[in-house]
């Protein structure tokens, strides 16, 4: 069914809207299911090949309607903030796990097989000082967010073994780029720091700033998601998505200051509950399975982000 749409749950969000744009650019039809909790219609372009369904992945009937007639699914809908899940475990669970289970059921019923899933580095918890984490590292989810992502992986694997679903499970490390919404304290750290630095507003670092993350540029991620939607054999094992580079928040701020020619005042608050100390991807499986020829360095990605207009 080459003419049938690809469904993107969470398609009005940061990553989902970049994926929608890329699919539309190659002539696909796209259907977005999004409850617009953090996503926005304005993130998406106007296109007659784009259908936007406002709805909730926590509601099975709505998911069934959205899946009907689709060729494949990218399942990105979730409360993306780890901190929000610490403060509202039940509310986030409905989106982050029930949503995945609803999708699995709806796909089984409709006979749709391929699904690309946005899991997270959060499933690993804390594993030592800056060591690269491979996919077989024991899982130690520290937060409701991480527990729901890990459980989602297990449900997808059950539907793979039992019902022939073809999940491609990616464990994204920290994704950043244009259109990541900086407006909430729960937003991704780069979006917040870049916005505040640009406007000259004070920046708060939670903890000592020596915690590290492996930051990965959104357009490079989308190139991988497109391959996973297309591939004849997605493989049954999850794949880390990161650069295998650890950057501390203090280093991140130094690079931003360098690019902008200075920084506003930076203060420190208490570290967040459940915050992971170090996170760095062993990406050998990613490089073996997917073409990742032009990955963007953090400095280049930050420069592109700072140059980008509000909607790009
Ligand atoms: P985002 O908040 O911009 O996107 C999430 C989208 O899902 C939003 O448009 C939101 O409105 C929608 N949504 C939330 N709950 C929903 C529900 N119940 N029903 C329908 N739609 C719902 O965040 P993002 O950074 O684009 O994240 C996309 C996915 O990638 C999420 O699953 C997130 O957990 C995962 N992820 C993100 C990162 C990152 O660094 N950004 C890293 C690892 C995993
Ligand atoms: C992020 C993603 C999560 C993903 C995970 C994978 C978001 C909102 N979260 O979580 O979806 O699963 O990566 O690794 O996209 N911080 C500050 N000041 C701020 C904001 C944050 O110091 O104003 C700190 C946090 O305490 C944390 C670090 O920055 O130590 C990163 O925070 P955040 O961007 O929220 O990401 P993660 O919690 O790593």
Image: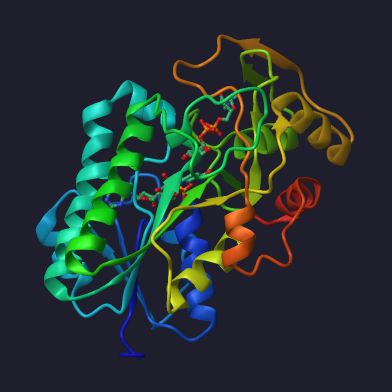
Residue 189: where, in percent of width, then height?
60, 33
- Choose top left, top right, bottom left or bottom right for residue 237: bottom left
Q: Nearer the viewer, residue 180 or 67?
A: 67
Residue 88: where, in percent of width, then height?
28, 25
Q: Residue at x 70, y 27 (%)?
A: 249
Which quadrant of the picture is home to ligand 2?
top right
User: Could you tell whether 30 is left or right of 156 in the image?
Assistant: right
Depicted 222 relative to depicted 297: above or below = below
Q: Nearer the viewer, residue 40 or 91?
A: 91
- Choose top left, top right, bottom left or bottom right for residue 182: top right
Depicted 168 relative to depicted 4: above or below = above
- Which residue is outermost to the bottom? 2
> How many numbered marks does the figure carry?
0
User: Could you tell whether 301 is left or right of 274 in the image?
Assistant: right
Q: Which colouring convention does the figure follow?
A: rainbow
User: Could you tell whether 62 is left or right of 284 in the image?
Assistant: left
């Amino acid at each position: 069914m080459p003419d049938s749409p690809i469904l993107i749950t969470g398609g009005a969000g940061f990553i989902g809207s970049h994926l929608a744009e890329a699919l539309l650019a190659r002539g696909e039809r796209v259907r977005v299911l999004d409850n617009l909790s953090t996503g926005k219609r304005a993130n998406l372009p106007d296109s007659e090949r784009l259908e936007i369904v406002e709805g909730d992945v926590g509601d099975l009937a709505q998911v069934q309607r959205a899946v009907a007639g689709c060729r494949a699914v990218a399942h990105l809908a979730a409360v993306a903030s780890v901190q929000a899940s610490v403060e509202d475990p039940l509310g986030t669970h409905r989106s982050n796990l029930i949503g995945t289970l609803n999708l699995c059921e709806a796909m089984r019923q409709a006979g749709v097989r391929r699904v690309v899933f946005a899991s997270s580095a959060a499933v690993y918890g804390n594993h030592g000082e800056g060591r690269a984490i491979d996919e077989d590292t024991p899982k130690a989810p520290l937060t409701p967010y991480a527990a729901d992502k890990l459980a989602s992986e297990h449900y997808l694997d059950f539907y793979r073994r039992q019902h022939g679903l073809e999940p491609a499970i990616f464990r994204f490390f920290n994704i950043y780029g244009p259109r990541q919404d900086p407006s909430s304290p729960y937003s991704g750290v780069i979006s917040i720091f870049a916005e505040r630095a640009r406007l000259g507003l004070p920046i708060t670092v939670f903890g000592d700033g020596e915690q590290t993350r492996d930051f990965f540029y959104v357009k490079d991620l989308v190139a991988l998601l497109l391959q996973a939607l297309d591939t004849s054999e997605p493989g049954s094992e999850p794949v880390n998505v990161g650069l295998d580079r650890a950057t501390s928040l203090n280093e991140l701020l130094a690079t931003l200051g360098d690019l902008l020619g200075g920084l506003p005042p930076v203060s420190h608050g208490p570290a967040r509950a459940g915050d992971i100390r170090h996170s760095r991807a062993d990406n050998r499986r990613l490089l073996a399975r997917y073409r990742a020829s032009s990955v963007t360095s953090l400095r280049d990605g930050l420069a592109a982000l700072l140059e980008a207009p509000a909607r790009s």
